[in-house]
Image: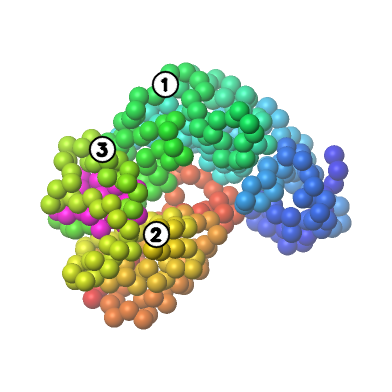
Amino acid sequence: MRLHKLTNQAVKRIESGEKLLRAEDFVLQDAARGQKEGTILQLVDENKRFVAKAFVSQQNKGLAWVFTQHEKIYFNEDFIDNCIEDAIELRASYFDDEETTAFRLFNGEGDGIGGVTIDWYAGFVQINWYTRAIYNEREWFVTVLKHYLPEIKGIYETKRFALVEGEVAIEHTDGEVAPSPIVILENNIRYAIHLGEEWMTGLFLDQREVRRFIQQQAQDMSVLNLFSYTGGFSVAAAVGGATKTVSVDVANRSLEKTQEQFELNGIMTPSDAHEIRVMDVFDYIQYAKRHQLQFDWVVCDPPSFARTKQYQFSVERDYQQLAKDLFDLTAVNGFCVISTNHSGYEKKQLIQDMNHVIQAHQGDFQLIQVATMPSDFPTSADEASQYLKVLIYYRVS
């Protein structure tokens, strides 16, 4: 096994718990870039002292993931077995929770192996493969999953890397075919999950605790949900007693999908109490401002990048400008939820950017909570691993 020297800075990052490696972390960058997918790298410092071992698994985040800092641990079937067994044990409370039947079963580098995530939906499993290198280990992943969880009803897989001719990106690969939709519970609220159809299944599981918070706080309040997707925040608010919800998303499918979520919980939509607007979010914001509308809750979880006929949006470039409008639409004694899953937008920078917006705003806002991902989404120390940032502001005046 060839030794690969790391820069001193990269060694310190690994020692602090980071796992993602980029070409610039290596003394010989071209040699690192030339490594084949699936190659195991023995990493040393500039004095050739052992630091760690890494698995070459290239994606946009980087080119390799550290999997151990011990010389006698190897990336093999036993290692995968141990990681999955540990991950299942970590989720024991979720398997026992009758009010929540969907969760992240394996969260990539947070559970010891970068490039793969596995989600549990009421007995059905979806495996997301982000690199071909880790996909090449799929047979053992599936074998181990079925060994430790014989109750699995069916398995779906998505390949989120470049495909070769004849490969299918999204498919059912084992066991029963899931009903469409699967009805899962989250904090005793019913949601529809569609497997095998699109990249997204109908609900972002990492926002579970934010939806719970809104559910608990929204009684007798109005809620504006922007970039609403299938209306998860709106449904949580409505079940929690919100008197008014407005869900806004430009995608045509959002109407049908959001109606489905509401109706699963016995709430008919659209209605005067629960509006669903299929329109550009930025157009709705201008409409709301012209009509001097304000809401007790303004929830915004935009995509990292978006393009419509009239607008182009980048979270890093444009969120400050968007936040000015979000704060305008937030009523006194109301709440504004600023969320992003863009891994490249650091939490520290997001908070700093929002502070600049607040300082220039006529209202008085206080940051009351920084939400983190739930316990079924363990992370490494890498910023890219801790991708979800959710800031909840309270408007004092």
Pointer 3 residue:
260
Relative to 340, say whether 201 is above or below: above
Relative to 343, say whether 319 is above or below: below
Residue at image coords 51%, 54%: 387
Task: Name which residue type carries label 1.
Answer: Val
Asked whether residue 94 is drawn in magenta, I would say no
Secondary structure of the residue carrying tag 1 is loop
Instruction: Specify start and end residues of the magenta stretch as a single range.
Output: 224-248
Residue at image coords 83%, 51%: 31
Secondary structure of the residue carrying tag 3 is helix
Task: Name which residue type carries label 2.
Answer: Lys
Q: Which mark is residue 177?
A: 1
Assess disc 1: are there few (<14), some (14-19) or many (≥20) residues with their C-alpha within 10 Å of its C-alpha. Answer: some
Q: Is residue 210 left or right of residue 198?
A: left
Q: Quarter of the image for the C terminus: give it.
A: bottom left
Residue at image coords 44%, 57%: 306
Residue 221's quadrant in the figure? bottom left
Q: Quarter of the image for the N terminus: give it.
A: top right
Secondary structure of the residue carrying tag 2 is loop
Q: Is residue 341 left or right of residue 240?
A: right
Q: Which mark is residue 309?
A: 2
Nearest to N terminus: mark 2 or mark 1: 1
User: Rounded to the nearest whole Å, what is the CA distance between mark 1 and mark 3?
Assistant: 21 Å
Does residue 385 show up?
yes
Camera-side residue: 276 or 371?
Answer: 276
